[in-house]
C-alpha cells in the first residue's frame, strides 16, 4: 500500500510540475477539426487475464505495479477528422486504421510503428509508470496511429493523456472499481458510480469493454470528451456520448 500511494504522490507532483503551464495554456490537441476524443483506460489485471499469450507488461511483476494505482493508460483517440471525412473516409475505417491511412504501419511489432517518443526524462518516467504497455512500445503505436498525422507534439500528447488519466484515478469512480477487485459488480452499478463521480447523465459518456466467456471480465473503460473542452475534463459539460460497450449484466473485476 505504501508503494501504491508513494507512486501516486510522485506522479501527482510530477504532473503538477509538468502540467501547471498546461492549465493556463492547454496543448492544442484539437487543431485538426474533429468532434471528440475517446480516452481509453485499461483495467490492467483484467486485460492480462484475458490474454492467452500475455505480453511482457503482464508477465513482469514490476510492470504490473501501475495497475495497483487504478486504471492505466491505453490511449487518447481523436474522432474522425474533417479532412479525412471530406476524402470519403468512413468512421469505422478511421477507427481501424487512423493515421496509418497516410503513413502505412510497418510490418512487425508496435516498436516498428514509430521511433521512440522524444519526451523529457521526467515525463517519460511518468508514462512508464502509467502505461505498462510502453514496455511493448504501445506508446509509439498509439502516437503513430492516433496523433502523428494530426500535428500533435509528442510531449503535449503524452502530458495531456497523463493528466486525464490522473483525473479519473483521483475520482470516486476509480475508487469504486478498485474496492471491488477480485469480485463482481452489476454493469449498471458501474455506470451509476460513474454518474455519482462526474454528474447526473454522464453515464452516456462511459463505454465498458469486457472480454472472456460471456463478456464478463472488465478490461477497459472508454470515456468520450468534447474536443473543444479537454481542459474542462472531468466536468460534466466536457463529456460526450459514446456507443454502448458489450459487457454482461454482471462484470468481474480481476485482481493480480
Image (cartoon, rainbow, N blue to C red):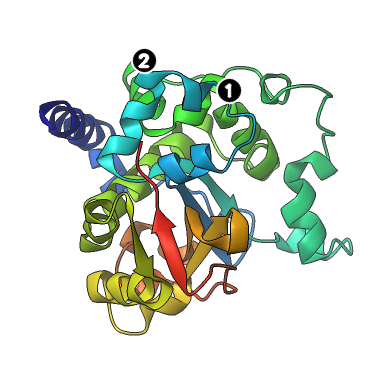
Q: Residue at x 39, y 78 (%)?
A: 188
User: Which residue is nearer to you in this view: 126 or 169?
Assistant: 169
- Which quadrant of the figure contains the C terminus? top left
Mark 1, secondary structure of its residue: helix
Instruction: Give the label on residue 256, or none.
Output: none
User: Which residue is nearer to you in this view: 241 or 160?
Assistant: 241
Side of 55 where 171 appears, left or right? left
Instruction: Give the label on residue 121, or none.
Output: 2
* 196 over 102 or under it: above or below: below
Q: Which residue is mark 1?
A: 136
Mark 1 to mark 2 CA distance (whole Å): 19 Å
Residue 128, position in %: x, y?
A: 40, 24
Q: Residue at x 16, y 26 (%)?
A: 3
- Which quadrant of the figure contains the N terminus? top left
Side of 32 where 20 appears, left or right? left
The answer to which image quadrant residue 56 occupies is top right
How many residues crowd around disc 1 within 10 Å: few (fewer than 14), some, or many (20 or more)?
some
Q: Residue at x 73, y 20 (%)?
A: 112
The answer to which image quadrant residue 5 occupies is top left
Q: Residue at x 61, y 27 (%)?
A: 140
Q: Earlier in the sequence, mark 1 or mark 2?
A: 2
User: Which residue is nearer to you in this view: 175 or 125?
Assistant: 175
| View extreme (bottom): residue | 201
Residue 224, position in %: x, y?
A: 49, 66
Amino acid at each position: 500500500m505504501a508503494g501504491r500511494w508513494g507512486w501516486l504522490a510522485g506522479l501527482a507532483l510530477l504532473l503538477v510540475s509538468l502540467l501547471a503551464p498546461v492549465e493556463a495554456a492547454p496543448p492544442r490537441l484539437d487543431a485538426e477539426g474533429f468532434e471528440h476524443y475517446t480516452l481509453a483506460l485499461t483495467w490492467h489485471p483484467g486485460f492480462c487475464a484475458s490474454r492467452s499469450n500475455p505480453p511482457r507488461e503482464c508477465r513482469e511483476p514490476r510492470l504490473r505495479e501501475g495497475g495497483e494505482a487504478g486504471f492505466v493508460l491505453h490511449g487518447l483517440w481523436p474522432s474522425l477528422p474533417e479532412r479525412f471525412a471530406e476524402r470519403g473516409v468512413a468512421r469505422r475505417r478511421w477507427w481501424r486504421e487512423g493515421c496509418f491511412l497516410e503513413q502505412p504501419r510497418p510490418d512487425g511489432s508496435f516498436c516498428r510503428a514509430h521511433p521512440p517518443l522524444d519526451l523529457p526524462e521526467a515525463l517519460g518516467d511518468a508514462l512508464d509508470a502509467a502505461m505498462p504497455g510502453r514496455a511493448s512500445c504501445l506508446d509509439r503505436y498509439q502516437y503513430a496511429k492516433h496523433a502523428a498525422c494530426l500535428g500533435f507534439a509528442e510531449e503535449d500528447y503524452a502530458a495531456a493523456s497523463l493528466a486525464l488519466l490522473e483525473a479519473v484515478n483521483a475520482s470516486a469512480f476509480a475508487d469504486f472499481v478498485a474496492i471491488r477487485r477480485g469480485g463482481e459488480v452489476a454493469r449498471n452499478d458501474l455506470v451509476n458510480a460513474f454518474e455519482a463521480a462526474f454528474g447526473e447523465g454522464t453515464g452516456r459518456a462511459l463505454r465498458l469493454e469486457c472480454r472472456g466467456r460471456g463478456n464478463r471480465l472488465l478490461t477497459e473503460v472508454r470515456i468520450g470528451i468534447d474536443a473543444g473542452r479537454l481542459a474542462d475534463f472531468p466536468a460534466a459539460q466536457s463529456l460526450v456520448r459514446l456507443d454502448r460497450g458489450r459487457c454482461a449484466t454482471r462484470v468481474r473485476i480481476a485482481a493480480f
